[in-house]
Amino acid sequence: MGPNARPETDVSDDAANAPPPVAELRRRVARDMPAARAELERLVRIPSVAFPGFPDEPLRRAAAAVADLLRDAGLDDVRLLDVPASPQAVFGERPAQPGAPTVLLYAHYDVQPAGVAADWRSPPFEPVEREGRLYGRGAADDKSGIVVHAAALRVLGAARLGVKVLIEGAEETGQGDLEELVRARPDLVAADAVVICDSGNHALGRPTLTTSLRGMAKLTVEVRTLSGPVHSGMYGGPAPDALLALIAMLATLHDPAGNVAVEGLGSFDYEGGGYDEPAFRRDAGVLAGVALAGSASIAEQLYGRPAITVIGIDAPAVEGAPNAVVPRARAALGVRVAPGHDPRAARDAVVRHLKAVAPRRAVLGFSDAGTGEGFLAATDGPAYAAATRALAAAYGRPVSFYGQGGSIPLVAAFSAAAPGAELILWGAEEPQSKVHGLDESVDLGELERCILAEALFLAELAATE
């Protein structure tokens, strides 16, 4: 099939290479679910946050736990990879038998910060089941992906298929350090197919393959106007307020309808599935009576257009704020970039816009917090067809094809390092998972179906000559 297939040899018994029947794999997955759930709970208990200011020890513990899972799943060659300026990645490998293809399985063990633990219904790093869902930070994004890979390999057992597993430790930070390693070591990811289990279904129980991802850019803008705070009665008026200046600048990023108003941010003609308004309002938690932003359809905006979000502001807190003119304010911006467009050019366009609208009485500063490329899937290859069949069989219903508004920067690095590989994006996440938010969770039935889909997919690849 591709870069890792070995010379074909005669097979005396074709039946020996036939994939196990769907019913048999379904039974194996069901028997394995208690073990898979225990593995997920073990991982969720580790607060593996890779952002600056958080401890390193949980990251080392998570990497070691993942390595153990991969060994238990049947990979003898498992090792930790040093990634400059980032936590170690975990890599496991089993070579292909003669004539068989190789698949690379990707996920990440780091998680978003939990925020204020008291705001969660249950402690964020103590997994708890409620109504068939397992709650905890990382239960869905993306420790479920690790468990899907390990469980699928375990229930499949010995197979002709070559397997590589790469589990990252700093995906959520968006710094791109593993991307540099992949570019420098394309041999690590050389494969015929790559499965990125860091996506999910459009709705619970609705099997979905992700066909596109938006790119991303992060930046910080700082506004300074005074050497320090001054009395708002004695100096307010002529003394320029940094926070007001910043607010005025940020307000120009969108037009009155809520569309991005920055020149130079392109769009993509999205042709996948739609997203009806009632479902979106429910999934996003939009309050009753609050209008949605933007003039295009919801799906077009999410999957084919840029978006700019103010993801943080440094300013005096309301509680205990002094009665003073604010001398300095700072905002962190997240820019989502339409597939096929350059995230670095998008970041530069936002900087140009903010400079152009800034009051002359303000001193500006900008810092780059990283970029990531978008992705467009090739959907006409044999591995993609096999993934579609496997997902449909696992769920018992046709597969939907959707873009995703989020970003997985490493996908572009995979495409460049393994240009002949087909990339499949799926996972156990869905809107109720609330990834990156409070009370993150994974539906245990969805997890089981995702494990079955991957096991079926791997079994079909293993039977490929």
Image (tube, helix red, strand yellow):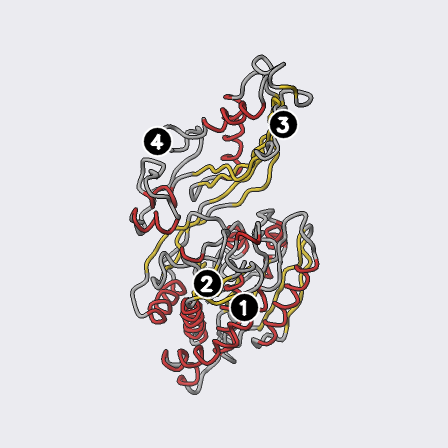
What residue is pinned by disc 3? 322
The CA span between labels 3 and 4 is 35 Å
Label 1 sits on a secondary structure element that is helix
Q: Quadrant of the C terminus?
A: bottom left
Q: Residues within 10 Å of mark 1 (few under 14, many from 20)?
A: many
For the residues bearing labels 3 and 4, Cβ distance under 8 angstroms:
no
What residue is pinned by disc 1? 40
Amino acid type for the residue under numbered disc 3 = Pro
What residue is pinned by disc 2? 442
The CA span between labels 1 and 3 is 47 Å
Residue 196 seen by the camera? no
Mark drawn on residue 257 = 4
Q: Residues within 10 Å of mark 2 (few under 14, many from 20)?
A: many
The CA span between labels 1 and 2 is 10 Å
Q: Which one is nearer the viewer's eye here, 167 or 142?
A: 142
Residue in view at x 57 percent, y 36 percent: 219
Residue in view at x 56 percent, y 35 percent: 313
The CA span between labels 4 and 2 is 35 Å
